[in-house]
Amino acid sequence: MKQKFSWLYIGICLLFPVSVNYIFPKDQVLAVVIQYVLAIFFFAVLSRRQGFVLLIAYIVATALAGLVKALISGWNTDIQLQAIFHHIVMMFHIVMVYICLYWLKGLEEENRHLKEQVVAFMKYVGSSKVLTKQEFEERRALVNKAMERRGEKGYEIYFSLESIPVSVRSALFDQLTALAVRTFRERYDLVGKWDDTTFVVLLQNTDEKGMRIAMDRYFSKIKETIHIEEEEIVKEVKEIGSITEEVGSS
């Protein structure tokens, strides 16, 4: 169905130049093209409901304008029929632009929604072992309950690359998260992507001394392999578990 509609859309787009060259009088071509381009622009930026209101208003306004012009100019029957035919052809093209553009918008929205669903069902970011935000939050909730039940505490450490240049941020993000997965305790600590510039590490059953040792080990690995200074990464440390309070940030 979608493929057939795509071919129909292509056919309609090709039909417009034919109409311009062989149906409309030469003195009307510029006005017709301008109306067509403006319709594409407004339908592209307006919502479906707003676009429909504009479409109806355009049809009524152009019909009334033609009627007034016919009365003022005293058109005969042949000219009136010709004007009605031109109006019908123009309305056909504008209506098809409306239908096709909002169909394409619907496909785009559907694809975006499907991508969000796929990401939501994924446990890891791409082929890495970094958890997606939803998966991280679900596992964090279980870890927090377990630590509270056992009277343990841990730490959440947020690493932000907001101060890193955009041109290298994505590649550096991948390197830092991959290194975090290898450095912190596998199958015990959690590493997750929080957003496009931030990832988070959850250290469970760890006191402040253990957290500092783990952080020092991680940044030592960073200096050895990536050559970036610790100060370039914005960090936020939160204590979780038996006591939930923020203990420091830098």
Image (tube, helix red, strand yellow):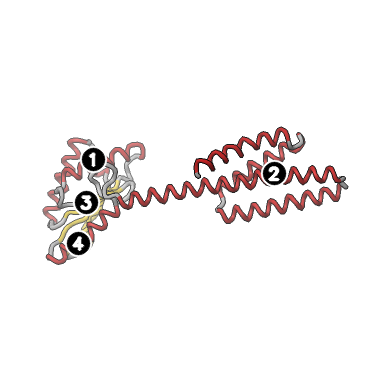
Q: At numbered mark 4, what does the secondary structure look like: helix, strand or loop?
A: helix
* Foreground label between 3 and 4: 4
* Dot 3 amino acid type: Val
Question: Position of 23 compared to 214: left or right?
Answer: right
- The label shown at residue 229 is 1
**Disc with the residue nearer the chain's start (1 vs 2):** 2
Residue 230 placed where, x, y %? 22, 43
- The label shown at residue 201 is 3
- Front residue of this view, candidates 44 and 229: 44
Q: Residues within 10 Å of mark 2 (few under 14, many from 20)?
A: many
Q: At numbered mark 2, what does the secondary structure look like: helix, strand or loop?
A: helix
Residue 63 placed where, x, y %? 75, 51
Q: What residue would you read off at disc 2?
A: 90
> Could you give the CA–CA distance between mark 1 and mark 4, rounded to whole angstroms?
31 Å
Q: Residues within 10 Å of mark 1 (few under 14, many from 20)?
A: few
* Dot 4 amino acid type: Asn
> Could you give the CA–CA distance between mark 3 and mark 4, rounded to whole angstroms?
14 Å
Q: Tell me whether circle 4 and circle 2 mark residues in contact (CB < 8 Å).
A: no
> Could you give the CA–CA distance between mark 2 and mark 3, rounded to whole angstroms?
60 Å
Taking the image as drawn, is residue 91 in sight?
yes
**Disc with the residue nearer the chain's start (4 vs 2):** 2
Residue 98 placed where, x, y %? 60, 48
